Image: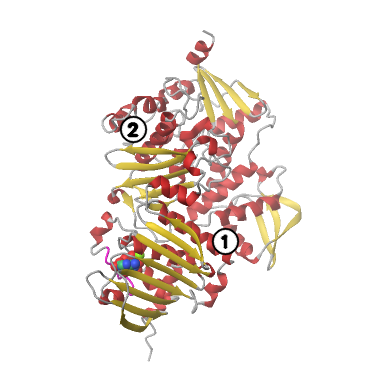
Amino acid sequence: MSLDIIKLLPDSVANQIAAGEVIQRPASAVKEMLENSLDAGATQIDLVVKDAGKTMIMVVDNGCGMSETDARLCFERHATSKIQTANDLFAIRTMGFRGEALASIAAVAQVELKTRRKEDEYAVKIVNEGSVVKEQTITSGPVGTTLTVKNLFFNVPARRGFLKTNAAEMRHIVDVFTRVTMMNPEVGFTLTSDGKEIYHLYPGNLKQRIVGLMGNVYDERLLPVRQETEKIKINGYIVKSEYSKKTRGDQFFFVNKRFIKHPYLNHAVEGAYMEMIPKDNFPGYFINIDIDPAEIDINIHPTKTEVNFLDQNLVYAVLHAAVRKAIGQHNLSSQIDFNSPAEPNIDFGKVVSADTPLFTSVDSSTTSFNPFRTHESSGKISSNEDWRKLYGERVDEPKDEVVNSLVDEDDINDLLRGINLEKKQDLPCIQVNNSYIVVATESGLLLIDQQAAHERILFEKYLKMMDSSVNTPSQQELFPIPVTLSQNDVSLLKEIMPEMEKMGFALQQASPTSFMIMGTPTDLGDNDPVALVEQMLENQKCNAKDVSITRKLNLAITMATRLSVKENTKLSNEEMQNIVNQLFSSSVPELSPSGKKIMVKILNDEILTMFD
Ligand code: ADP
Ligand code: MG
């Protein structure tokens, strides 16, 4: 006689398992709680934390409150007032909708909810510990909701053990607070930590809110960005180019007020600054993209900050133009004359019309690829005409100068006509400053940044290797090189090992905290293999995301930036030829994987006028 062995998990266990995904640290609970208060229509929201949220997180709001029944129901999994049918998913304007945040929080903490609607005379208080309701009473209290979350992970010691120092957890909380409050300037917020008020944000306009969060010096630094088309509305502020920074800390995108990260759109903004900021500096921006929810895929995990646009090329184009316009109108830089028809801009038309975003790899086995083809229409914005459609009809503000100056893809095609890739001919190349390759073509000159170009080439090479089914043979080390690592790094390294091996590393674990590098990729040159491995781990940590595609991009970028030929390096003629030829068989010859401009063109016409 056989026994049936499958059982349904009790709710408390199911909730606890699911909580692991939604609530990873105090800051995740803070985010859900603040968002719920916003969804409840609160105009004042106060956040109080103790021990960086480990001991207590309290959010007090003056929003709509809950009925007694709802107050009890809200801790159930999939309990939400925000959607009812699957169709509602395409019209979501609220921050939450999955109905799992409170259930998750209650599964791993001691929670006290006090809430009252304005039509009710009394408030209701509910105490829930680890998904078990311990108390439900009627009490007095103001309209709105106060949710107190104590001893997060009290019943999941392993999780609690993984929390970082108070300083680190507090940084996460401040990040979340910044992201949630920024695009809601009409709502007042405070943040108090261990009895000390660290933010007091008064209701006001967006500029005041940004200044309130980022500091008074920003008052002088911001330029408004505004652009409206039929489908999207962009508003926000960018930081003047002279205040660009060495880090990306000031970069904030929001879609319908929800914070997102989006390398492709980031590129649209950074590209718009072009040569106005020094290389290696990053512009700051605080930009909201308002878009019909049906135009984005919001069906993403609540803790993720990615978003997919149905038409991301359109968003790219509008955003780029909007930032360009903001910079132009304020005449920030005298370096660029926006009325000049010959304003050099090599990358825009192509990037916008590329079907794939910045990070793409090209399978060279599809030999039909020809970087010098004229653009086939992909149904996206790809021709001047589409541009006019987009702007001419929708935007009544100065339209032409910005937009027209961005479209000169004919020029680039002209310029490249002289080069025939199939023949792999020798191109007349010279090196300038040991950093740039100048290529003469029939219709003009191309100036190529050797480092950026080589990064693009290596990036695609390593992406391809990782996608291949076989490991790349590595260069065997005569004497294996030891690397000592922390426990965390050891597990991380094990995680990325398959990809590393595909790229030509040969690694062997030697002890619980050390590895031997037995072999390295052939491109390594003088690079220190230990430093390279460490850098790869570091970059993985900075961009910790569990999507494997992002992991590959990350690894490929690290390899490319690390192993590329640097500026101030003399190249032989053959090396230059190789770079140029390989660059033009890459998928995006205009841009390095980190978004740097690879080339600048000078047309014969322009050369002529220089001598007039
Ligand atoms: P979701 O926000 O995805 O709907 P949550 O678990 O975060 O799911 O919240 C469940 C429900 O509890 C919400 O849909 C809302 O009706 C109610 N709720 C949560 N927090 C508040 C609050 N601060 N004020 C009023 N209602 C709230
Ligand atoms: Mg919610």
**Residue 328, placed above or below residue 42:** above
**Residue 601, placed above or below residue 206:** above
Q: What residue sits 61% from the left and 43% below the top? A: 561
Q: What residue sits 54% from the left and 39% below the top? A: 244
Q: Residue beneath label 1, please?
A: 495
Q: Amino acid at mark 1?
A: Glu
Q: Residue beneath label 2, please?
A: 377
Quarter holding residue 524: top right
* Stretch of the chain drawn in magenta: 76-82
Helix, strand or loop under label 2: loop
Q: What residue sits 47% from the left and 42% below the top? A: 219
Ligand 2 occupies quarter: bottom left
Q: Residue furthest right?
A: 479
Q: What residue sits 66% from the left and 58% below the top? A: 507
**Percent position (x, y) of residue 443?**
49, 17
**Residue 425, placed above or below residue 91:** above
